Image: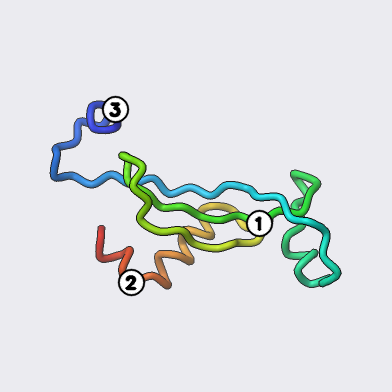
Amino acid sequence: MVRELFDLKMEDLAIIADATYCRREKSSNNDLQYKTCSEQKMDLLTKPFIVCCTDWFIIDCYGPFQANQNDATSFDYILKTDRNLISIF
């Protein structure tokens, strides 16, 4: 579907990079509690970040990231630290 939508050739690579929220139980560690608290969602959350191909082959899983960190910041951090992922592009 993605190949038709964006008119990609078979040798072109399209990836999907997205984070999702996972709920956490309450912790006695105050620092962890602060980092995982999402004011918007009113819950304790962490965010694993998944990078996969359009055929759902998983390239890598990163994280968990803090709940108050947006996807762009997480992906920027991943691109700065993972040299193998940059070589794909």
Residue drawn 82% across the image and 65% down it: 27
In what element is the residue under mark 3?
loop
Among the 4 quarters of the image, the one containing residue 69:
bottom right
Taking the image as shown, residue 54 lies to the left or right of residue 26, namely left
Location of residue 42 in the rendering, given as x and y in whole percent from the top left corner = 80, 46
Residue drawn 65% across the image and 50% down it: 22
Location of residue 50 in the rendering, given as x and y in whole percent from the top left corner = 46, 52
Q: Which colour scheme appears in the figure?
A: rainbow
Q: Which of 69/49 is in front?
A: 49
Location of residue 2 in the rendering, given as x and y in whole percent from the top left corner = 29, 32
Amino acid type, residue under disc 1 in the picture: Thr
Q: Are marks 2 and 3 in contact (CB under 8 Å)?
A: no
* C-alpha gap between disc 3 and disc 1: 31 Å
Q: Which residue is mark 1?
A: 46
Q: Which residue is mark 2?
A: 83
Amino acid type, residue under disc 3 in the picture: Met
Location of residue 88 with respect to 42 vertically, above or below: below
Taking the image as shown, residue 38 lies to the left or right of residue 80, namely right
* C-alpha gap between disc 2 and disc 3: 29 Å
Location of residue 89 in the rendering, given as x and y in whole percent from the top left corner = 25, 58
Q: Which of 71/33 is in front?
A: 33
Location of residue 71 with respect to 54 vertically, above or below: below
Q: Earlier in the sequence, mark 2 or mark 3?
A: 3
Taking the image as shown, residue 53 lies to the left or right of residue 28, namely left
Q: Which tag is nearer the camera, tag 2 or tag 1?
A: 1
Taking the image as shown, residue 5 lies to the left or right of residue 40, namely left
In what element is the residue under mark 2?
helix
Residue drawn 48% across the image and 47% down it: 18
In what element is the residue under mark 1?
strand
Q: Which residue is mark 3?
A: 1
